[in-house]
Amino acid sequence: MIELVAAKEDCVSVRYNGRWLYHPQRPLEHARRKAERVSFYPNTLYIIVSPVLWYGADHIRNNLPAGSSVIALELENDLRELALKNIPDGLDIPLYAEDVLRHIDYSSYRRVIPVYLSSAHSLNRERYDKLLSHILSEIERFWRNKLTLIRLGHRYVRNIFSNIGLSEPVYTLPYTKNPVIVAAAGPSLEKSMLFIKKYRTKVFLTAVDTAAPVLIKHDIVPDLIIILESQIVNSFDFVGVPRDIPVLFDMSANPSTTKLFSGRKHAVVSNFAPTSLITRLKESFSLPVLPALASVGSFATYLASLMTDNIIILAGLDFYFYRGLSHARGSLFHYYILEKSSRLNPWPFLWERKLISTGMTDLYTSTHLSSFSSQIEEINTISGGRIFSVIESPLMPSVRGVDDGLFPYLPDTSIGYKVLQNWSISRRIDFLKQEKVFINIFLSALKEDKNIDADCFPEIDYIKYILPGQSVDLNNRGTRGIAISAAMEFLRRIDASVTYLKRLSDT
């Protein structure tokens, strides 16, 4: 029940279900004092938590620095109706509820500052804290991805142009009626080996890159290996792995790694940035476009949800590690740790903070590993809760442990797939030639030394995502130099692929 009570300042205070939401006598003065204590920064999203009668909100709105915005958040239905009825004329602050996540442009902000002008937030403190934490996590995720694109984005693009020059036919996503096991190289993979061997004939076994040598060491050959990494160092993960195993690779993966394998190849493309290049790849070659998940384990789990309607079982996908054991024994990184360790430094490179409140001792994780575990829980929700784990993880409470009752006998072990019909040599050559035209137009404009805007070249909009800065300025000499260098590298990759494909067509 909402009560509007007259106060001393020619205004009203609010009592809700017997609780005062403002000072009973001087609500406006106290709200303004709270607003005046707020610090202002550029590129910041200010969130007024439960604005009630909007006291003090005008101070926030009127003092916003460049690039900053203010919104309001109200989760209590009665108070939301009250706030909507009492928005002052000209205030123009949008009011959201749980749907706030869909309305935020995370690329515009560097930080989030909650503003408490009333005590109404205490009515739903946990829900507000969870939403605010989620918003902050999304902003942090965006900027982590942005930094990744600046560092690796040029590799993604040039790898795409190189992978188009593959000689082998490329196949669609495989499909199976059986459960899919996703094997990763976490410490629990070794503990999962007995389970995998027991049900090997009843499941479709996929392995992320780092898990493949561990499985081979235990005489287990996966049905499919997932290749996502754009850097050449990933190829060392496959030392000792048979070359005839089918692989599923991202088009942005390093071409030297994909060429290691002679077996069947399935191709997908990660939507690493909202660029027209991804759209053209999908339209020209009918390639599946998947969300960019950064973690090959999350990527493989999402793929598994598309490859089967049956259950998905995680093995070794931990996102945590123990002192001295970050990866399963037999993986490349584990050998690397052993080689670098010494008496004075027995645990090199594993300095992450200890995980709190798991009930497990000597258990460690990191910020990015924790965010990957959240991705798995989101995939589990989207896929209807059909993801299980051989060894339950404290970081993924919604992913339950697997049991024998989930394994009915399934005699049909066939795998469905077909060749991509659009992956012809002539079609790929035409695609690459058109991309070359787009890049040459861009290069000509850069070399004319005139003022240009990156938005004027929508066909190569990917250039915006691989250059430094929140907003790309191609008129800056350093930025222009980086852009020219990247464009020249793309042209070299295109020419190499076209030359190779022409030779194939002549044979």
Image (tube, rainbow, N blue to C red):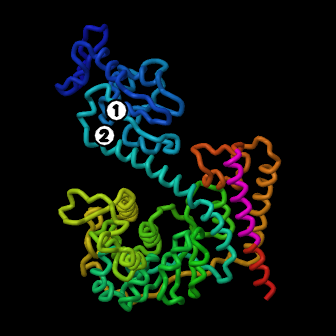
Is residue 376 found left or right of 486 in the rendered image?
left
Residue identified by numbered label 2: 128
Point 27% across, 67% down: residue: 393
Query: Badges 1 and 2: C-beta atoms under 8 Å apart?
Result: yes
Question: Would you name the residue on which mark 1 appears?
Answer: 49
Amino acid type, mark 1: Val
Q: Is residue 481 above or below residue 94?
A: below
Q: For the residue labelled by badge 2, is the local secondary structure a helix, a strand or a loop?
A: helix
Q: Does the magenta segment cover residue 484?
A: yes
Secondary structure category for the residue under label 1: strand
Measured along the vertical axis of the image, is residue 241 above or below residue 368? below
Decide which of 393, 52 is in the foreground and name it.
393
Residue 280's mark? Answer: none
Q: Residue at x 32, y 37 (%)?
A: 75
Q: CA distance from mark 1 to mark 2?
A: 8 Å
- Evaluate whether residue 236 shows in this view: yes
- N-terminal label among 1 and 2: 1
Residue 285 vs residue 106: left or right? Answer: right
Give the x, y percent position of residue 374.
36, 58
Examine the structure image and report whether residue 361 is included in the region drawn in magenta.
no
Mark 1 closeness class: few <14, some 14–19, many ≥20 residues within 10 Å:
many
- Name the side, left or right, on which 497 lies relative to 77: right
504 and 378: which one is in front?
504
Identity of the residue furthest to the front in this view: 344
Q: Picture quarter containing residue 59?
A: top left
Q: Residue at x 72, y 43 (%)?
A: 475
